[in-house]
Image (cartoon, rainbow, N blue to C red):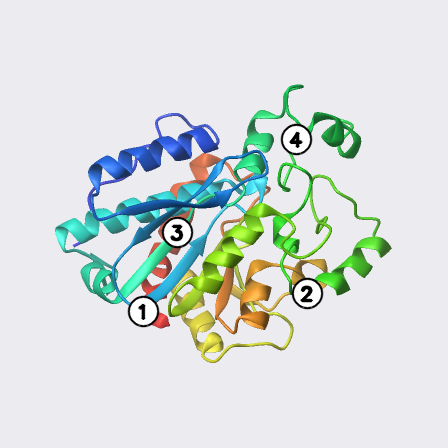
Amino acid sequence: MESQKRMKFPNPTPFDYQQLTEKIISFEKRYPFLRYQYIGTSILGKGIPALTLGNGHRSVIYVGAHHGMEWLTSVLLIQFIEDFCNLYESGGLAGKTSVRAVFSTHTITVIPMLNPDGVDYQIHGIDSDNPLFERLKRSNPSMDFSNWQANARGVDLNHNYDAGFWEYKILEKENDIKEGATRYSGESPESEPEVAAICNLIRFQKDLRGVMTLHTQGEEICYPFHSTVPKGAHAIARHLSLLTGYTINTGNGLSSYGGLSDWCNQKMSIPSFTIECGKGKNPLPIHAMPGIYTNLKNAFFAFPTLL
């Protein structure tokens, strides 16, 4: 039986850190079996929340909003959490997946918004009382943050992982990429607290079987890092493609360096997949969420069972 409950987003507005916090507080009150913690803090001191479902020994991790403009991925993951909780309570199915069975065999950790500062920059801009105001003014003289992808100090989190990092620094110089809205990788791998937090979670997570990281846009499933393919990754990617209708892309160019999925596949030998959700121009509008979620829902629920 499919859940009949649907999360309501009464105002068609972008989804910022405050709204995320309010959703999590409401979940705490409604779902006593949902566990909640912070895995670290952002540059500006915002807690990075992680919500955990299940008590099985096999672990999977979902990550949203590496990039400021891609806050819609947080909405998708929040919707997944609510649907999972409702189906767990009712004993229902998501497609062919028994939610209670997954709950008993797996532990699912969801980080809906890895980059809360970047999301808030993109949605609200910055004020002169921001402690990084002068630095940001130098790197972004227009003070227009509508295309902001990076974290609070201008580092693109999905280039800050230790996977081809130093090779990317050469490309960065050749392409005159500097700190700012996008693509700058930082001074060293894991120099950013947001990336360090998720890497430490992955390093110490027991029996971690797979990672799914959400981005927008392109309707693609991206993997792996160059020729590094963990065992079983091909079959999982094909299955996810069948469930979503998304095409498989093995990555190329600047985008194939320094990402979370790259690091998981290359350095940790953990099957990891980047899902490029929806199509259009970033930031995708909030009203696009229901259609995108419909395409992805069965893949979200089935992912733990594929590993």
Q: Nearer the viewer, mark 2 or mark 4?
A: 4
Q: Image height check: is 193 above or below 163?
A: above
Q: Image height check: is 150 above or below 56?
A: above
Question: Is the C terminus in the top left, top right, bottom left or bottom right quadrant?
Answer: bottom left
Q: Secondary structure at mark 3?
A: strand
Dot 2: few (<14), some (14–19), or many (≥20) neighbours within 10 Å?
few
Residue placed furthest toward the left: 90
Pointer 2 or 4: first along the chain: 4
| Residue 57 position in % (x across, y down) | 29, 68
Tell me the tag on residue 305: 1
| Residue 39 position in % (x across, y down) | 45, 48
The three-letter code of the residue at mark 2 reads Asn
- The residue identified by callout 2 is 252
Pointer 3 or 2: first along the chain: 3
Tell which of 199 and 147 is nearer to you. 199
Q: At 31% across and 61% down in the image, what residue appears?
A: 107
